[in-house]
Image (cartoon, coloured by chain):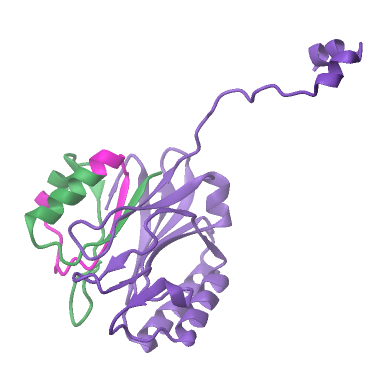
Chain colours: A green, B purple
């Protein structure tokens, strides 16, 4: 069971998604825990693209009122 | 975020600074709990979060836990270094160590960098990102380590937990030369 953990400092731009995607493939991780997404919600298409698979799931705590998304 | 082949989530808990997944590991069919922590910086919220996590762990039936994230706290003074950094107070270290003790969890041994966060200009660093597991987790997944990778697109390093137990094959045969002088030696080795 391989898990990746990272405080990403904002998941707004494509480079960061790309980094996580490449790292996940390289390590063959089945789960990713991210802190500080700075997003209100995770875009479905982006998540599927990140995994290149639709058989995935995620739960996100949105970035509001000082909370920074994780 | 996870693949359904690996993990099936049955329920989750959300709170200020944490996200908890309760479900089943799909390959082993073992119930597990995954905790993603993002601790606030101010001490009051930080200790509230710790207390909440301790209570959740106490009340949760499944004890096979893996907890990771940005704790915004360190265990020892030398895990925070640099200029203009908030003086690491002993209270924070003691509080954090108490928290770890109360959750009855163990930090996985680490490989790679000592620090997980670097200020972009390089004048400060700390080890605030960690991965803990419970004894029950170790029963199912022994030999795991946390690999702290090089910093790339964030001021925090990515950490990966993975198993690194290597099968080196059969153990080499060793013996003392004098044993050969005993006539029973060959037969005993054959028998065993």
User: Which one is nearer the viewer's eye here, B145 or B24?
Assistant: B145
Task: Point out the residue furthest to the right here.
Answer: B183
Q: Splitting the image into 4 quarters, where does residue B4 fall? A: top left
Q: Is residue B47 left or right of residue B171?
A: left
The picture places residue B49, in percent across and down from the top left corner, at: 40, 79
Reply above or below: A9 against A28. Answer: below
State which region is magenta.
A24-46
Q: Splitting the image into 4 quarters, where does residue B156 fall? A: bottom left
User: Which one is nearer the viewer's eye here, B112 or B9?
Assistant: B112
Q: Is residue B62 left or right of residue B6?
A: right
The picture places residue A49, in percent across and down from the top left corner, at: 12, 44
Identity of the residue drawn at 25% across and 58% down: B151
Identity of the residue drawn at 19% across and 65% down: A37
Task: Point out the residue furthest to the front here.
Answer: B177
Identity of the residue drawn at 17% across and 50% down: A19
Q: Is residue A33 magenta?
A: yes
Reply above or below: A61 against A50. Answer: below
């Amino acid at each position: 069971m391989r898990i990746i953990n990272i405080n990403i400092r904002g998941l707004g731009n494509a480079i960061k998604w790309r980094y996580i995607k490449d790292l996940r493939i390289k390590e063959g991780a089945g789960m990713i825990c991210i802190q500080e997404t700075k997003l209100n919600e995770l875009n479905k298409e982006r998540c599927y693209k990140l995994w290149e698979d639709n058989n995935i799931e995620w739960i996100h705590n949105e970035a509001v009122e000082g909370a920074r998304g994780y | 975020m996870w693949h359904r082949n690996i993990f099936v989530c049955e329920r989750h808990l959300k709170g200020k600074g944490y996200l908890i997944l309760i479900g089943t590991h799909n390959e082993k069919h073992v119930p597990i709990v995954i905790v993603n922590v993002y601790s606030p910086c101010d001490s009051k919220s930080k200790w509230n979060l710790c207390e909440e996590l301790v209570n959740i762990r106490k009340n949760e039936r499944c004890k096979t836990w893996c907890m990771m994230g940005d704790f915004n706290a360190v265990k020892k003074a030398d895990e925070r270094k640099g200029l203009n950094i908030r003086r690491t107070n002993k209270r924070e270290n003691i509080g954090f160590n108490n928290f770890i003790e109360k959750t009855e969890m163990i930090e996985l041994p680490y490989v790679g960098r000592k620090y997980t966060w670097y200020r972009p200009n390089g004048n400060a660093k700390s080890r605030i990102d960690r991965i803990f597991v419970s004894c029950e987790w170790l029963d199912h997944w022994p030999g795991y380590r946390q690999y702290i990778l090089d910093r790339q697109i964030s001021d925090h390093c990515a950490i990966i937990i993975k198993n690194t137990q290597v099968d080196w094959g059969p153990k080499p045969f060793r013996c003392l030369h004098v044993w050969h002088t005993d006539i029973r030696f060959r037969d005993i080795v054959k028998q065993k």
